[in-house]
Amino acid sequence: MKKVFSRPRSLKSTPFHYCAGCGHSIIHRVICEVIDELGIRGITIGVPPAGCAVVAYNYFDVDMLEAPHGRGCAVATGIKRTLPDRVVFSYQGDGDLAAIGTAETFHAANRGENITVLFINNAVYGMTGGQMAPTTLLGQASTTSPPGRNAILDGHPIRMSEILSNLEGTAYIERVAVNSAQNILRAKKAVKKAFQYQIDGAGFNMIEVLSQCPTNWKMNTVEACRWVDEVMSKTFPIGVIKDTVKGRKDAD
C-alpha cells in the first residue's frame, strides 16, 4: 500500500508539549513540510522565541539558535548577514514580536533584511498566563483586562502586518490561519512562497498566523477554531497584504 502521510524528516519524533488544540504544533509541521519539499533542511537555521515555543529546537530537526525575548529579527539578521547562503527564519509570538521586539522587527523590515518571519498571533501572552497582548481584541477578556480590552485605557489591537507592509523594505506579507483543513493548506502555500522568496533574494517577508489558544481563551478546541473565523479574523483579515515580488513577475 502506498504511503500518503508521514512525519516530515525535518520534524523530530519528540512529543509536543503544547496544550490540546494549540496551533503551534500545526504550524511546526507546516514549516517542516515546506523545508522538506524545498530540499533545504541542511541549510536552514531557525530562531525560536521566548514564549510557548521557546523550546521549538526540541521539535525542528534543523539548526536552531535561541534569541533573547523580542530579538528574533535581530538574531536572524546577524545569522543571514554572516551566512548569506543559509535560509533563516524567525519564529515569534505576538508579545515577542509586537511588544518587546517592536523595534527589532520594524527596523529589520525597513532595511529589507532577506529573512523569513513566522509571526504567531494568538491574541494573548500564552506562556505566562493569558495576559493582554498587543494583539488582544477590543472587548476580549484576559488576566490583565478581565472586563475586556478597552480602547481608551489600553489602546487598539496592533495590526503588525499592515504596519510593516508600508515599509519599502518588505517584499511579501500574508496573514493566514490554521483553524481548519482548508486554512492549513493555504498557510502552507504562503509559508512555502515566503521561503522561496528568501531563496530568490526578494527581501524581508513575513507570514502572520492566526493561531487558536483554547487554554487562555477559556474555550474548547472547536469553540476556539470557530472564534478565529467568526471574531478574530474580523480584526485581522486573512489574505495577502503585500506581494511586490508577484507584481514584478507580473510586470515581466
Image (cartoon, rainbow, N blue to C red):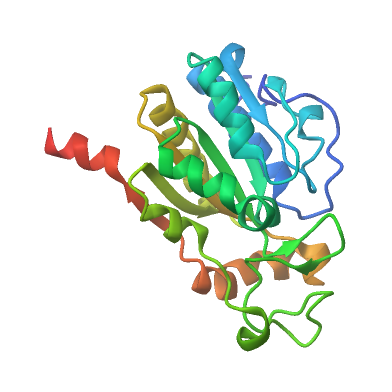
Residue 205 in the image, given as x and y percentages of width and height: 44, 40
Task: Give the side of residue 104 with respect to residue 54, left or right.
Answer: left
Task: Give the side of residue 78 with respect to residue 52, left or right.
Answer: left
Residue 98 in the image, given as x and y percentages of width and height: 61, 56
Residue at 60% across, 11% down? 42
Q: Quadrant of the C terminus?
A: top left
Closest to the observer, 217 or 74 = 74
Residue at 67% across, 85% down? 153
Residue 135 in the image, given as x and y percentages of width and height: 62, 66
Up/down of 145 relative to 2, above or below? below
Q: Is residue 72 visible?
A: yes
**Tally of marks:** 0
Residue at 67% across, 65% down? 123
Quarter of image, res 194: top left
Residue 103 in the image, given as x and y percentages of width and height: 57, 50
Closest to the observer, 235 or 221 = 235
Q: Is residue 178 visible?
A: no
Up/down of 120 relative to 247, above or below? below
Residue at 67% across, 84% down? 139
Residue that sits furthest to the left in the current view: 252
Task: Give the side of residue 126 with respect to residue 6, left or right.
Answer: right
Q: Quadrant of the N terminus?
A: top right
Up/down of 204 relative to 242, above or below? above
